[in-house]
Amino acid sequence: MNVNKKVFAAWMLAFATTAVSVSAEDSEIKVEQSVTLTVDQAVDYALKNSRTLKSADIDLEIKERAAKYGWNIFLPNVQVTGTMSRATEYSPSSAATSQLMSALTGMPAKTDFADEEDRWSVVGGVSVGWTFSLANIKQLQLSKAKYESGKISAEQSTNEQLLSIKKLFYALLLQQESLKIEKETLENSRQRVVQAQANYRNGTIPELSLLQAQVNYENKKPDVESAEQNLNNQLDTFVFLIGMPVGTKLSLSGEINPKYIDVSADKLIERYGSNSLEIQSLQKNVDTLKMNLGAIDLATWTPSLSVNYAWQPAYIGEEGAFHFFKDVGKDEKWYDSGALSFTLAWNFTNILPWSSNKQQARDIKQNLAKLEISLETLKENQKIAVRKAVDTLNQARAQIENMNRSVQLAQRAYDMTYRAYRNGTTELLDLRDAEESLNKAKLGLVNQKFNYMTALLDLENTLNADLSSEGDK
């Protein structure tokens, strides 16, 4: 019966702590749920849930809407009005209206207001205005160019965010590997305590050797606990960064195992130099300024055409203003006025060299020159960054090969020292030195692999290219 209870408790514990693998379609995660992620799953999840990326998407939607409906500058301005007004005293305009009514209806003209209703009048109005300038075409092109620039900026922001996520993911794997080595060292220290206790009971070692083993074991415990706590804090930061609920228990699935490539800096710049989103974004800014300059030139040297039509019906029936709705459709009770006009306007002031338009054009030309200088500088900086990244890759790869040999030699030295320690032919201090050398070699190897992977990620981000197929081995 006790055995059955233990089995049942073990099953319940296993069920409660089972890790859940998250696919790219999963977006809802409960707090305190245990989740296991690969680097690709973390990236996919961040694309759907990162708060930073959502904010960038909203900015892009605003620019997209501006580009989609930029043609609305060609829409006419249509306005409909209706007015009822009360005159406080009989004025010349009221007399003119009375004479007009007399001429249309044959009734005698009034010389004063007979009653309150005579003081009121009803006037409607419909006006349509449309203005066209060649500069409007440039403005339409400009709104589309801003949207294209916004897409590049959004993609650039996304790539930077995903680069940070990948780097942090591998940095966490590095921390996990370091913690694993420390735990192995702690376990080795514990086993040496057990061995020392047995040897002390058998009288083969003095009490001092036993105390040294115990002190070494106890001193390592706080370091391991601190490293584990630091790792958990970094995992919480990673959870927040990719948009998961704070408090989610996260574990990472993966390893620091780079895929080596053989690349030449000159060939990479020649093949992928123009792919850089930073360069493309700056080039779009140059194009946008040129369009602005073109719009100002068109506004300066070409006239604008305005077409306007206005229609104003007024009720002049003898029933009074409050009864105009009874006579809808009876032309003799309504007086219509309207006008159609075509206006061609050319502002000659804008041609003057000291006008605001000319000064604005000069400012744009100077800003354009600055951007072109920045573009050339950016291209040169890209060459430097690519060469530096390639050198880092080559150096890290050489270091990895050296560290692999160092790990093998350090492992052999530790194994031999451990056997000698168990046989009582060497001191504990020698064993600890051999173990420390082995740990340094292992950590050095993992660090160089991490350096290679992060340098490759930086290079791919600089060139905006996937380099996994570049002479891989």
Image: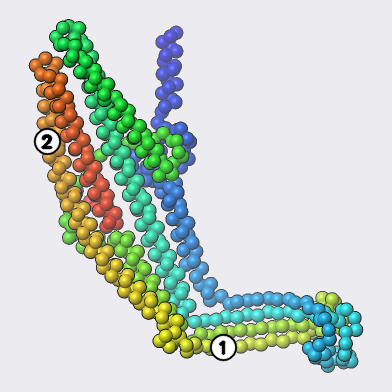
Residue at mark 2: 405
Q: Amino acid at mark 2?
A: Arg
In percent of width and height, residue 6 lies at 42, 14
Which residue occupies 81% across, 81% down? 87
Q: Nearer the viewer, residue 230 or 270?
A: 230
Residue at mark 1: 343
Asked if residue 9 is positioned above or below residue 409 in the image, the reply reads above
Which residue extends farthest right? Answer: 114
Q: Amino acid at mark 1?
A: Thr
In percent of width and height, residue 462 lies at 27, 56
Q: Nearer the viewer, residue 274 or 419?
A: 419
| Pointer 2 local density, CA inside 10 Å: few below 14, some 14–19, many at least 20 | some
Residue 150 horizontal side relative to residue 306, left or right:
left
Of the residues under marks 2 and 1, which one precedes in the sequence?
A: 1
Q: Nearer the viewer, residue 458 or 355?
A: 355
Which residue occupies 41% across, 10% down? 3
Which residue extends farthest front? Answer: 208
In percent of width and height, residue 387 lies at 19, 56
Q: Is residue 70 visible?
A: yes
Which residue occupies 45% across, 33% down? 33
Circle 1 SS class? strand
In percent of width and height, residue 421 lies at 13, 18
| Quadrant housing residue 436 | top left
Circle 2 SS class? helix
